[in-house]
Image: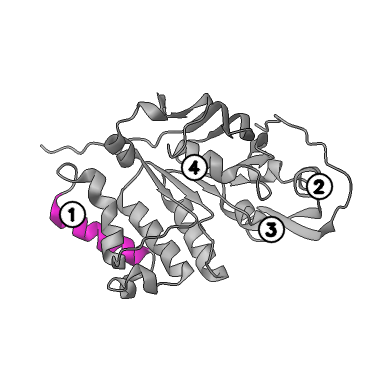
Amino acid sequence: MSSTTPAPLPPPIRLDGVGYAVGDVRLLTDISASAPAGRFTGLIGPNGSGKTTLLSTVARWTRPDTGRVLVGEREVHSFPRRELARVVAAVEQHSSTETELTVEQIVDLGTIPHAGGRFRRVDTRELVDDALATMGIEMLRTRTWQSLSGGERQKTQIARALVQRPQVLLLDEPTNHLDTSASLEVLALLRSLEITVVAALHDLQLAAMYCDHLVVLDHGRFVTEGPPAQVLTRDLLAEVYRLDAEIAEHPRTGAPLVVLCGTIPGPERTIGLNRRIP
């Protein structure tokens, strides 16, 4: 009698007092926040709030000088490199290469962490084909990286990450360079993956529509976290973004609908830090 082993549950991400500085410039200060297991978490905040830097500490591209990053119950720096690549995949906002790799070759790079182990070569071919189809870029498979538009490059990098079959997917501005239709398609896909997804997003309405959980940063500090309907309030948008906005309910989905009315001039803002919303 045959039996199947259930897929491992995706791990949550937990940040515990994370801080990071470059020289005398402190980019992150004492950040404690979470990304629930198997849910889509959005990192939001103004430009320069620390979203990209925080993602890089989770991806282990940078090491915090204070605090720790936990993937499940393990500190992220305790993973051997290949094991981490089997658990966590990351997509940068700006990716570049001087080599003339084709789209298919770039996507195939996602199979490297599993070489000689989890997948046979025939399996990897199917994974690459599936990822190209999922991102709608099958027709680009023989195109070189240098010939791609910004949006095509973004889709290629997401396809490469999907081929890794990660339990955690990190993305820095995944809708960058994408038109409106493609942005909606990509975010709907990310929400459907049933893994732990953390994405830095600048569009508040897209974050409200697709994220299960939001973490708000400002000036490298944690502001608040929780469900979009509870996080995205008039007061928060005024304090953190200096926006005059009304929050309505989306007529179809019930998600928060951010109605922008203008900006709020004034002196340096005072931000209520370290607030959590259950």
Q: Find the distance from the CA under tag 4 to the CA under tag 1.
A: 27 Å
Please tell me whether residue 253 is drawn above or below residue 3 in the rendered image.
Answer: below
Amino acid type indicated by mark 3:
His
Check disc 4 and report the residue beneath it. 39
Residue count near mark 3 (Cα–Cα under 10 Å), binned few <14, some 14–19, many ≥20: few
In what element is the residue under mark 2?
Answer: helix
Check disc 2 and report the residue beneath it. 238
Q: Find the distance from the CA under tag 2 to the CA under tag 4.
A: 27 Å
- Residue pictured at 39% horizontal, 29% vertical: 77
Foreground disc of the pair 2, 4: 2
- Residue pictured at 28% horizontal, 35% vertical: 83
Residue 123 located left or right of residue 219? left
Residue 212 in view in this figure: no
Q: Earlier in the sequence, mark 3 or mark 4?
A: 4
- Asked if marks 4 and 1 touch (Cβ < 8 Å), the reply is no
> Which x, y percent locates residue 217?
66, 40
**Quarter that holds the N terminus:** top left
Q: Find the distance from the CA under tag 3 to the CA under tag 1.
A: 42 Å
Q: Which mark is residue 123?
A: 1
Q: Earlier in the sequence, mark 1 or mark 2?
A: 1
Which segment did they paint magenta?
A: 120-134
